[in-house]
Image (tube, rainbow, N blue to C red):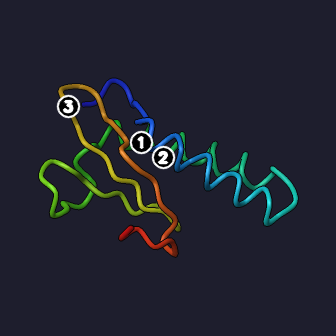
């Protein structure tokens, strides 16, 4: 069982980019606030079942497919580290 979740600097930047995009597109932060709240709830659930993600080609990196987002993470001891977050329509091959 995982005891804490850490967002990497890259994941923080990804989340800020997603929130900024939605705020600009919707001309409001209402959706972004709801999205952030749901993300926190989903990450808390992931702490209870940390191995529920899909294996990736990168060793020790798991992928959680959540709504329209890909969340890449690793598990180290009792810590879940979110390495990046992408919308499914983004080009992540960059």
On the rendered structure, is 90 left or right of 58? right
Q: Quadrant of the C terminus?
A: bottom left
Rendering coords of residue 66 (x, y %): 46, 61
How many circles with numbers are drawn on the protein? Answer: 3
Name the residue carrying label 2.
42
Question: In front of the other: label 2 or label 3?
Answer: 3
**Mark 2 element type:** helix
Name, please, the residue furthest toward the right: 27
On the rendered structure, is 71 left or right of 28? left
Q: Which is nearer the eye, 83 or 30?
A: 83
Name the residue carrying label 1.
45
Q: Quadrant of the N terminus?
A: top left
Rendering coords of residue 61 (x, y %): 21, 51
Rendering coords of residue 68 (x, y %): 52, 68
**Mark 1 element type:** helix
Q: Are marks 3 and 1 in contact (CB under 8 Å)?
A: no
How far apart, in angstroms, are the residues tagged by discs 1 and 2?
5 Å
Q: Are marks 1 and 2 in contact (CB under 8 Å)?
A: yes
Residue at 33% x, 36% y is 81
Quadrant assignment, res 78: top left
Counting residues from the start of the chain, the first of labels 3 and 1 encountered is 1
Name the residue carrying label 3.
76
Rendering coords of residue 28 (x, y %): 86, 55
Residue at 72% x, 51% y is 32
């Amino acid at each position: 069982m995982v005891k804490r979740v850490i967002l990497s600097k890259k994941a923080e930047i990804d989340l800020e980019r997603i929130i900024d995009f939605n705020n600009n597109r919707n001309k409001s932060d209402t959706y972004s606030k709801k999205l952030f709240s749901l993300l926190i709830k989903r990450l808390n659930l992931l702490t209870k079942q940390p191995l529920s993600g899909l294996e990736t080609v990168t060793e020790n990196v798991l992928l959680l497919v959540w709504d329209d987002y890909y969340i890449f993470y690793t598990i180290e001891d009792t810590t879940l580290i979110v390495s990046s977050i992408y919308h499914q329509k983004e080009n992540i091959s960059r």
